Amino acid sequence: MFDMAERGIGIDKIADILTSEKIPAPKGGVWHKSKVRQALRDAAYSGMWEQLLDGEVYSCAVPSIVTREQWDRVQAG
């Protein structure tokens, strides 16, 4: 997904590709562009989980599936 986004493939097309390849969405079923957009914006994929609680941001390191650099490029793209 991140590789496709970095190559300029749009979120609608990414959703179509993931669904056609029978890759389940996070909660099962087909991919929708909103879920692709949400996944691409989620810093947890780059190894940093963040949660806003009562106006404070809590962060912790988690295993990453993409580098922070690639995540940053996708955010800028």
Image (cartoon, rainbow, N blue to C red):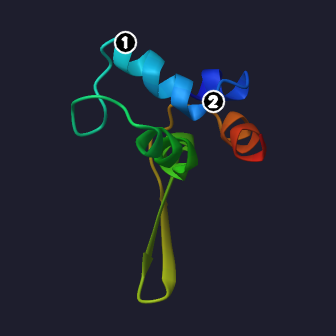
**Coordinates of residue 16 in the picture (x, y in percent):** 44, 21
Q: Is residue 40 left or right of residue 22?
A: right
Q: Which structural element holds mark 2? A: loop
Q: Amino acid at mark 2?
A: Gly
Give the quadrant of residue 73. Answer: top right
Q: Could you say which is closer to the camera, residue 3 or residue 51?
A: 3
30 left or right of 15?
A: left
Q: Give the residue drawn at x 64%, y 34%.
A: 67
Q: Position of residue 45 (x, y in %)?
A: 50, 41
Q: Residue 34 appears at what percent x and percent y?
A: 45, 46
Residue named by callout 1: 20
Name, please, the residue furthest toward the top. 21
- Residue 10 is marked as 2
The residue carrying pointer 1 sits among few (fewer than 14), some (14 to 19) or many (20 or more) residues within 10 Å by Cα, namely few
Q: Identity of the amino acid at label 1?
A: Ser
- In this orientation, which residue lies closer to the viewer: 32 or 22? 32
What's the residue at 63%, 22% (across, down)?
A: 3
- Going from N to C along the chain, the mark reached first, 2 or 1, is 2
The Cα–Cα distance between marks 2 and 1, rounded to whole angstroms, is 15 Å
Q: Is 40 displayed left or right of 32 in the figure?
A: right
Task: In the rendered view, tell whether residue 10 sits above or below residue 42.
Answer: above
Residue at disc 1, secondary structure: helix
Residue 51 is marked as none
Which residue is most to the left?
28
Q: What residue appears at the point 62 percent right and 21 percent down from the top-left corner?
A: 4
Q: Pointer 2 and pointer 1: residues touching (CB < 8 Å)?
A: no
Could you classify mark 2 by the number of other residues whose Cα lies within 10 Å: few (under 14), some (14-19), or many (20 or more)? some
